[in-house]
Amino acid sequence: MPGSAVSQVSIVIPAYNEAARLPRSLAVLAEYLRGWGQRPYEVLVMVEESTDGTLELAKETVREQVNFHIIDNGPQRGKGHAVRSGMLQARGDIVFYMDADLSVPVEEIAEFLAFFDAHPELDVLLGSRQHPQSRIERRQGWLRQTMGKTFNRILRMLVVLPYRDTQCGFKAFRKGAAREIFSRQQIDGFAFDVEVLLLAREMGYAVAELPVRWLNSPESKVHIVGDSLKMLRDAMMVRSRISFTKGNTGGAGDGA
């Protein structure tokens, strides 16, 4: 059970053509959250215009879950846009975003909340598949693993980020940091994670990477070559314009 220091938790889930995976994920999440008792929470599912009935299926799955909000987020623009929309609408004191396939199991939410409770100096927590203590229970294929690690190494060199895993779809923010970061975040595609981390660093927020359980979904929406090239292009664009935020606000620097 999560600690008592946080009054409300928001969970943002981006969704596009997720009819095959989202209903089960929402049912799993609803069952998990029922165990929270009186602890307030909200789940915001940001559905971009899909061709497989994702919006209707999601609404049907959670029709009796008053804290689940299925939001029609308009035409498909990309994961970054969907996450940004949800993060700026979220009302929680701690705001998560996570992938629709729940590759990081819902039980990790409690671990992150407990870590926030124990470390009030931290503003942002990153799930990291590359953390030495992470438990990779269902791995990606060899090619996708290799490409992912290579991409992350290149990113770290290009944008000088210290984090082992920028692309893990499981991150949590204190409310103030979420508002400040996502009100400035602009990338609509998959490189938005890099932009978020660059903004957090330049704005002085304290960030830590945590280990996670990981169960890879074989139906990944990321195209290994095409999307990786787009992410690198966008990351370079972000690096060139992000300095304007430096020093605008801040936390306490990077956590360990």
Image (cartoon, rainbow, N blue to C red):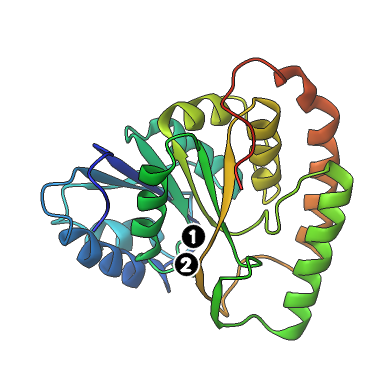
Residue at 58 percent of width and 35 percent of height: 206
Give me the disc on residue 104: 2
Q: In this view, does 165 lie above or below 43?
A: below
Badge 1 crowding class, 10 Å Cα cut-off, few under 14, some 14 to 19, many 20 or more, is some
In three-dimensional space, the C-alpha distance between marks 1 and 2, rounded to whole angstroms, equals 8 Å
The residue to which callout 1 is attached is 99
Q: Is residue 96 above or below residue 15?
A: above
Q: Which of 78 and 215 is in front in this view?
A: 215
Residue at 44 percent of width and 67 percent of height: 102
Task: Describe the element under mark 2 as helix, strand or loop.
Answer: loop
What is the x, y in percent for residue 203? 65, 25
Q: Is residue 221 above or below residue 3?
A: below
Badge 2 crowding class, 10 Å Cα cut-off, few under 14, some 14 to 19, many 20 or more, is many
Q: In the visual, does 173 lie left or right of 60? A: right
Q: Do the residues labelled 1 and 2 touch (CB within 8 Å)?
A: yes
What is the x, y in percent for residue 237? 83, 36
Q: What residue type is labelled 2?
A: Val
Q: Which of 14 and 108 is in front in this view?
A: 108
Q: Which of marks 1 and 2 is nearer the N terminus?
A: 1
